[in-house]
Amino acid sequence: MSLRLEEPLISDFSRGKEVKFSIDGREIKAYSNETVAVALLASRRRILMRSVKFHRPRGNFCFRGRCARCLMKINGIPNVRACDTLVRNEMTVESQNAYPDVQTDILSIFDKFSNYFTAGFQYHKFIRPKFLQQLYLNMLGRFIGLGTIPEKTNEKELKPYMTKKTDIAIIGGGPAGISAAIHTSNPHIETTLIDENDGLGGNLNFRKDEFVGITDYEETKNYEVVKKLIQELKEAPNIEVLTNAVVEGYYGNGEHTLGIVSDKQVIKLHAKRIVIVTGSYDAAGTFENNDLPGVYSARGIEKLLNVYGVKPGNDAVMLGGGSLALRVSKLMLEAGINVQGIVTKHQKLTLNSKQSVELPIINRAIIERARGRKEVKGVTIVDIDESGNVIPRTRRNMNCDVIGISYLQPTYELQFQIGCKLSYDPGLGGFVALHDDNMQTSIQGVFVAGDAAGIKSPAGSIIEGRIAGLSSILSLGVEDIGKEDLRRAYIKMLPKERLETAKMIGGKRRYVCFCEDVNESEIVNAIHQGYSHIEMLKRYTGVSTGSCQGKFCLISLIEILAKETGKSFDEVGVPTQRPPIKPVYLSDLASEDVER
């Protein structure tokens, strides 16, 4: 039975026309506006791939192209993100890293020997006798890895390469980025707004709840606020918008230089000022068996229901006590999903008048483990005291096929590359660039706003975007008393928002790095062996070296290292963040210079 609703919960979105594609030789019905991952979930296929080392089942988590848990072979090309790829008629999709298939992968027996193949095993095992080392490597290579390189591929056409200049580069086209661009508008100033998606608006496009916090947009649905912002942007002069364009790195050498890979060209962009509004990542859950298919980010569930009209399952438990958890839980009830409970660390979480639908709240508790062998079948919940310690004999089980994770963390890679001073603030979601009231970071001419400056509401993001845009243009010497007065007014409007943070539950099956199959106990053992520096620990265990580039594991790695060494998060620090920040094709790096 399909998990599709009659239609998406946001009526503006259409499924498109009916198409058919094949998955491992089996024909699947889908719609042209669905991605491969969504179409497979709608047909109740949750396991999309097997993990790199222990062949554990993997399924989508974020539905935003970040988590790398949906890598599949599509039309002969390996390691394609299924959640980013639209279904096309007669498309051929194959699962990877499994034999004979992902449902009955006999190589999952490696998971039974995980105590032997611990992190760093390659430095201690299979090294003697020396003459057999090559044989060992060949054998391991057959069973460990992701995908196989096709023997023959179509030659990829090289994109043109060019150098451009702009006064202000704004990286990120969500509500904060659009607002920043609007407030830089000036006939004598060139602004370039860059976003990796095919349209502007970010996550606000997928939200049907009412906007709160700015009078101009009150009593308007969040996705409708995006339309208003885009219309304001169109009316603002001298702003160039680049969509489907990834800022893959910062290459400053005395000036602000960005590497940009778009769907049409590769650009070296020189900017006098940079505004970073790159948003946030969905944070992973911190409990045992947190890698099972059926564990989804709350924003991923929201996108499934509002945009695609597909349910993640029938019975859900939500982890987290913030507005995101409440909003998405209410949305699931609207879609006919049985919400078993919202598990929160808060002593008492109550609903306000806008959350009128009754939701079962499980206060002062955490999820200890997900139950199930191949996918989520339930959860074990345990109570905690005021210090966050587990209270004995309070464990109880709940049956569910969906676990929602409502924690977020700011993006920080580009800020690190630029050299901005970062500091860890759990109330803001993670590492953020230190900045003043004008949203300027420790690097002159570099500004930050929105979730990249700390997780916040859409209203807070828009206000910060406005301040950053005004500050960037005023720093260029533009004399405008009206803009200066406006900036001061917006600074006074800034809301003070803090988050509930995740409570870590340790254990052998509590995975930290989903890409490289590294769990917490392996990391702890490595630290006790002497790998107590973040850079050495990363290299030895392989954590954050996988396909997601550390977006879902690095904060957990830092947390474990801080706990085991007695250091603060800031003392542990962040390992070097090198370009490319996001995956790009090798052919893009070999683009033809049209200026030569």
Image (spheres, rainbow, N blue to C red):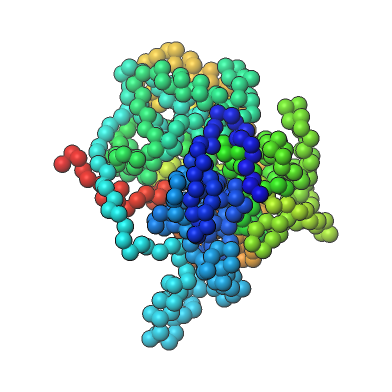
The quarter of the image holding the C terminus is top left
* Residue at the image position 39 percent from the left and 56 percent from the top: 77
State whether residue 529 appears in this view: no
Viewer-proximal residue, 284 or 531? 284
Q: Position of residue 112 (x, y in %)?
A: 61, 73
- Expressed as whole percent of the image width and height from the top left, the position of residue 254 reads 29, 39
60 vs 98: above or below:
above
Quarter of the image for residue 298 reads top right
State which quadrant residue 358 falls in.
top right
Q: Residue furthest left?
A: 596
Q: Position of residue 223 (x, y in %)?
A: 56, 28
Rendered residue at 64%/45% (across/down): 3
Q: Position of residue 380 (x, y in %)?
A: 75, 56
Q: How many marks?
A: 0
Q: Quick check: can you spot residue 134?
A: yes
Q: Going by the picture, which residue comes out furthest to the right?
A: 393
In the image, 163 versus 530, the foreground residue is 163
Which residue in the rendered view is the most extreme toward the top? 482
| Residue 114 position (above or below residue 548) | below
Q: Nearer the viewer, residue 425 or 183?
A: 183
Please tell me whether residue 285 is drawn above or below residue 447 in the rendered image.
Answer: below
Residue at the (53%, 63%) spot, across then down: 51
Q: Residue at x 47, y 58 (%)?
A: 94
From this view, report whether residue 526 is shown above or below residue 213.
below
